[in-house]
Amino acid sequence: MNRRSVIWNGLRVAAAIPFTETALAQTPAADASSRKVAILSEHLQWLRSGDEVGRACVDMAFDALDVTIGPSPSHVDPSQVQADLPAFVNAIRGHGVAVDTISCRVVEADSSILENVLATAAGLGIKSWSRQTYRYDLAKPLEPQIDALKPGIASLARLSEKHDLKLTYRNRAGAAFAGSAIFDLLELLKDLDPRHVGFLYDTGQAALAGGIDSWTIGMRAAGPYIGGVAFSDAVLKPTINTDEGGYFTGTPEQLNNFRRTPNRVNYGGGGQANPWQAFPVPLGTGLTNLPQTIGILKDIHFQGPLEIVAEYPNGGAETGADSISLPRAMVLGAMKRDLLTLRAAFGRTGFI
């Protein structure tokens, strides 16, 4: 086990320590002036009932939950949303945990189901919903694909306006994803009302897509279209293939065959184009610059919802699994550590 692993495991254990009955009773309540921070219910799908999820939020000191609506094992089945969502949300709120946002996995083709989801959410006082961004076909010209997205986005914005909700698209790093560099998707949003459509700005994904602080330009440009912020973190690591302990030094033909070697992922080195791979990590341990991010949020007068996305290895919770391979206290402790890291950054910047 390397030094980073030892340190991180130690932090996870430390974060888990408060999850005893005595220590939980001594955990102070969140300051009333603090901005609410949500955790994704997707990370808690190994807890099945709303009551269990609500207790877990309290244990971690989260004061809000972003409810994921999608296929099983999601807590809310889109086809049963009129029954499932109110029951789940009311159970969460019964623990003093706010539910103001949902993450929706319903595709536009399921228009009647999506309409039911949004109508039910609005009836519960939920204010915004997010969805994943679109994929480009990199084998085809990009400009026609970007233009083709506009009618669908405008239609969803109108649907959001109908239900007095805000739709936010979560950015994702990578050439295949619309909005990875912000400006392509921002161009499509600029003629739409930012009260009803915008970005769920993912800090870790933005940092991956825009190194050396170039992400700050996109964030500032998006300004009023940043409808929510998902705090995540990630690192880039070189994944250089080696041959007999050294860099690959063969011919181009040999290199091409080397790429096809089974069981190799994200090839790099030996003249290959991109010897780097992205890895999600706990908040505050990667590329995300929390003080700088929060400083920009102050500059653009951001007032939207905040959440934490915990996609680093965490016993299966990171992938939305319905069971976990680590102790409950350790899984919850890791996410609580993310929240404490964010709260500390808030305090240093005066964002509360």
Image: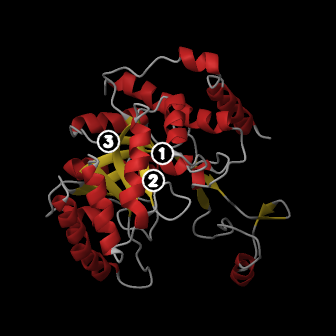
Which residue is painted at 54% across and 32% down in the image? 336
Mark 2 and 1 residues: CB-CB less than 8 Å, in contact?
A: yes
Three-letter code, disc 2:
Gln
Can residue 133 be seen in the rendering of this structure? Answer: yes
Q: Would residue 240 be found to the left or right of residue 169 on screen?
A: right
Q: Split into 4 quadrants, where in the image is the C terminus? A: top left
Tell me residue 73's x, y (percent): 56, 59
Tell me residue 300's x, y (percent): 22, 40
Which residue is painted at 25% across and 53% down in the image? 122
Which residue is label 2 attached to? 205
Which residue is painted at 22% across and 60% down in the image? 160
Three-letter code, disc 3:
Pro
Three-letter code, disc 1:
Ser
Tell me residue 90's x, y (percent): 39, 42
Q: Closer to the camera, 239 or 153?
A: 153
Q: In the orientation shown, which residue stands out farthest toward the right?
A: 244
Tag 3 or tag 2, which sits nearer the N-term? 2
Which residue is label 3 attached to? 305
Q: Closer to the camera, 224 or 87?
A: 87
Which residue is label 1 attached to? 232
Tell me residue 98's x, y (percent): 36, 37
